[in-house]
Image (cartoon, rainbow, N blue to C red):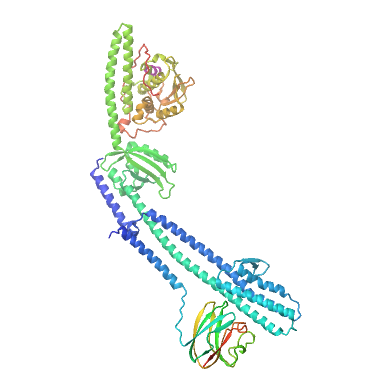
Amino acid sequence: MRRSPSAEAGAASATQRTAAGRRSGIGRLVPRRPILGDLRLGRRLGWVIPVLIVLVTAIVVYNARAISQQRGSALVVSVAARQRALVERYTKDVLLVVDGFQADPEESAEDVREPVDVLLDGGSVRAPGGGGARVEIPPARDWRVRRKLEQDRHLIDELIRTGDRLLDGGRADPRYAAELTRLRVLSAQLSSVSNDAAQEITQQTEASISRLVRIEIALALLSALAALALGLLLRRAGAEQAAQFRSLVNNSSDLITVLAPDGTITYQSPSVERMLGRRAADLDGTALGDLVHPDDRHEVNIALTKLAEVPGATASFGCRLQHEDGSWRHVESVCTNLADDPRVHGLVLNIRDVTEQAALRKSIGELYHDLARRSQGLVDRQLELIEELERDEADPDRLEELVRIDHLATRMRRNAENLIVLSGVEQHRRWSEPVPLRDVVEAALAELKEYSRVHVAPIDDLRLSGQAASDVAHLLAELIENATSFSPPATKVQISGDPAGTGYVLEIEDRGIGMSDAELIEANRRLAAPLAADIAVSRMMGFHVVGRLASRYGIKVQLRHSWYGGVAALVLLPAVLLPSAGERPAVAPPMSAGGAVLPDPLLPAEIAAPDWQQRAYLPLRRHATPTPDRGEGSR
Amino acid sequence: MAWTRSRRRWAWGLALALMLASLALVVFLTAERRYEPAPLGTPVNVRLEDFKVQRDMAVVPAGNVSFRILNQGPTTHEVIVVRTDRAPDKLPLQRDGLTVDEEARGVELLDEVGGLDIDDRHTLVLRMAPGNYVLYCNFEGHYLGGMYAALTVR
């Protein structure tokens, strides 16, 4: 593709701006760190994120463990501290009993034993708060605590044995004083040991919590580092993605345009300099319509207005945009309504330059047309010669041969006309006055070799617009030939007509092999939206020609299954093509099958728009002798 | 300067080593450290356990005496050194009848080491004049449980 000097300059300036953006934008704020440069960003993020997750999980686990340990240790300390009170109560109970008062030292002894057993071996114990509730205490694990508790248990056993001796001997026992002192000393020692154990447990707890806190602080620091690394990597990834996106947008051959709901441009990708020779900054805030060709503006407005009503919808249209040098560029645009997206809030247009394709199509169309016109002219001269020979021929056998040649030439002429239709250039054989519809049907039959197989039911006395007569005859000829070609020679093809609310319907029904549902859907799709000339057109030329001709006048053509086993083609001629007697019909604009005004966006206007004023007459020809020869068709 | 692959690996290794060194430093600074000063004077090894005080020398020369104390527990203990001419088991008690009255007449407090947990070690250096001394633990019931020892300084 050749590029204009201004486009070259635009591309160069865009490249410079991109480079400048890398130097002065986010890339400058986040310098490339060589130490991390060896790994790809994705891989780095791949290990930073798990590390961060592991660290945070460890912090949470350690925190939960510290809280649990703190709560459990408080309970253990309370239980250990209660030991002293229980020892004093036991001592008092023993002395009360020895002195003759009522007490229960055995129960007190059990109460003294229980806490130390539970602290050592684990289990449930009465809650320090009282109320009869019991709490579970895990066995002591620290060896210092265990040693002290074991000593505590040993002293308790000694205390209870001393108490038992006092209870057994009483005051009369000569060892009473010594045993009493021994009881008090053991009681004091037990208090001391119990306090010691409680303190040890407290110290262990504090040390453990302190250790956990240190670990948590270390983990938190590492987490902070990991989070910082993650943040930097994400920021760098974002910057790289933004730069990548910016590079793609800047260097794309397509335009990306964002339109506000009122049609003004809120963003224009820099590639507009290459396509239209305009600076993106100059277009910001201007209306897209100012760039669109006046003939396309209405269509573009309709398409954008419809699209703006449906958030999230996508539509495509073609139009011409004006280059800075005044020339027009043919473009195709795919537009998406992202008005609901807060990041865009507008219509996003992806615009592609198809000027070269349009020019190519135009030249191909002109080539088709020229070749077809030459062929048509030759065939017309051939037909004239054949007619002269037919008029002068008296021998019936030779006359029949001449008629067969005549039909073949007629088909060749219609093939040439098909090419002209597909080229997009109008034929000039038109009537100026309305033509009886019956004559148009007969003209279509005259194009056929097997017209004798066609039975035409009475058709209402209507007149068809002279400007459409030639093309309608061509359209009917294609459909009728299709019916005769794909039905057995012994069967009839029925043509009938009926008024409809919006026009007049001609029905062409055969009793042939029919079409599958899928084939019918595809054929109707081709009829409703004929494509530009391509390889598919050559395979189903008849349907494409019919679709093209129908679209010129707003005629609707639909195929459906016939009750006789074949296919019924319904042709709805719109009322605008059926003027009353003496009335000159309004000129119908070219219409799509759906009714919208849609010129072929891929063809230049001078080709796509028909010249409605230059029409010629269609010569009506008819032959008397049918010949059994199957022709080409679309099925 | 462009960073080559080997340089980047080296930088990664350095960063990892610095991180590990930082962690090691934190552990070293937060860990408890124990050290024993070199003994001064006559060393006397004192071993505490529930409820006994054992020493390897009953008579020491006057002057500096280093008591190298080891508590074998399991209970936490203290060591109090008093000079007295009373018998070791006849020290005056406080009104609770469970602890020694360190301020009583005939009892001169020299020094004390408190809060010795199981396996704790401590060295107590005293300048001791000739006389009779008693080393004991004055936690409730410990002295009366037999946790004392006599020491003679000549």
Farthest-out residue, left: A5
Q: What percent of the width, then of the height, locates residue A120?
A: 61, 70
B50 sits to left or right of B14: right
Q: Position of residue A451 (x, y in %)?
A: 39, 15
Region of the chain picked out in magenta, as a range:
A436-443
In front of the other: A491 or A148: A148
In the displayed structure image, the side of residue A259 where residue B66 appears, left or right: right
Pick whichever, A557 or A458, lies toward us: A557
Image side of residue A3 versus residue A520, left or right: left
Is-magenta flag for residue A167?
no
| Left or right: A143, with A427 as reference point | right
Splitting the image into 4 quarters, where does residue A527 fall?
Answer: top left
Decide: is B92 above or below B23: below
- Residue lying at the far top of the rendered structure: A394
Q: Is residue A617 visible?
A: no
Residue A614, percent from left and from top:
30, 25
Q: Is residue A10 above or below residue A144?
A: above
Q: Is residue B148 visible?
A: yes
Q: Residue at x 41, y 43 (%)?
A: A337
